[in-house]
Image (cartoon, grey):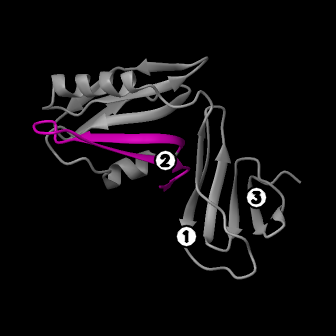
């Protein structure tokens, strides 16, 4: 059977159950996790912390197809954000035979940025100008894919960077 979502149990002897086409929920002794795999990233993160007796624990995991994202991409993003800290900006790191820096056409203001998301995005980053580096409720509604997300704030002082992994609306 090809169910869109799988429901798996992490027994002491291993994982059992039928995997889903898109993602799986894994019940473990330390909680309920969501696990998904795409061409650029695979991730397993905690959805609900709870104790489920009789099952084995499982850990959070993140794996990037092309390995760690090079520091130079974070440096480029920060330099772009610092060049115009009065507006929000968006950049992405895409993956196609390696990592690439992507800056789409965007409408920027002090309170937001709109843009077209490119293909094969592994990391989306945006700036919050002089505001704090936090993911807003608008960010959380927009960020529903399987990818990394970043926000950079306090560009008028010492910049703060926050990153999270997103698995179809769940974050860690």
Q: Residues within 10 Å of mark 3 (few under 14, many from 20)?
A: some
Q: Are marks 2 and 1 in contact (CB under 8 Å)?
A: no
* Residue found 13% across the figure and 41% down from its top: 130
Q: Could you tell me residue 25's position as x and y percent?
A: 68, 61
Question: Residue sitting at 47 percent across and 55 percent down?
Answer: 172
Q: Residue at x 76, y 58 (%)?
A: 6
According to the picture, the residue beneath numbered tag 2 turns out to be: 165
Does label 1 or label 3 sit earlier along the sequence? 3
Q: Main secondary structure of the magenta part?
A: strand
Provide the secondary structure element on which disc 3 rests.
strand
Viewer-nearest of discs 2 and 3: 2
Give the number of marks: 3
Single out the mark in the foreground, 1 or 3.
1
In the picture, the disc for residue 89 is none
Q: CA distance from mark 1 to mark 3?
A: 16 Å
Is 22 situated left or right of 170 in this image? right
Q: Quadrant of the N terminus?
A: bottom right
Which residue, given by chain and number where applicable, does mark 1 sit on?
48
Q: Which contiguous range is marked in magenta?
A: 145-172
- Disc 2 secondary structure class: strand
Q: Earlier in the sequence, mark 2 or mark 3?
A: 3
Residue 117 point in image, percent of width and height: 45, 29
């Amino acid at each position: 059977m090809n169910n869109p979502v799988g429901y798996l149990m992490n027994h002491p002897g291993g994982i059992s159950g039928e995997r889903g086409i898109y993602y799986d929920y894994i019940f473990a002794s330390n909680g309920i996790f969501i696990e998904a795999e795409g061409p650029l990233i695979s991730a397993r993160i905690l959805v609900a912390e709870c104790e489920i007796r009789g099952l084995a624990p499982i850990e959070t995991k993140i794996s990037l197809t092309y390995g760690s994202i090079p520091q130079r991409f974070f440096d480029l993003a920060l330099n772009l954000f610092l060049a115009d800290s009065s507006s929000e900006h968006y950049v992405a790191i895409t993956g196609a035979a390696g990592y690439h820096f992507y800056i789409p056409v965007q409408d920027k203001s002090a309170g937001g940025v709109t843009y077209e998301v490119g293909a094969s995005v592994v990391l989306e980053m945006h700036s919050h100008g002089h505001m704090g580096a936090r993911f807003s409720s608008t960010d959380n509604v927009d960020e529903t894919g399987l990818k990394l997300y970043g926000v950079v704030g306090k560009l008028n002082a010492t910049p703060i960077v926050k990153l999270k992994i997103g698995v179809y609306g769940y974050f860690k």
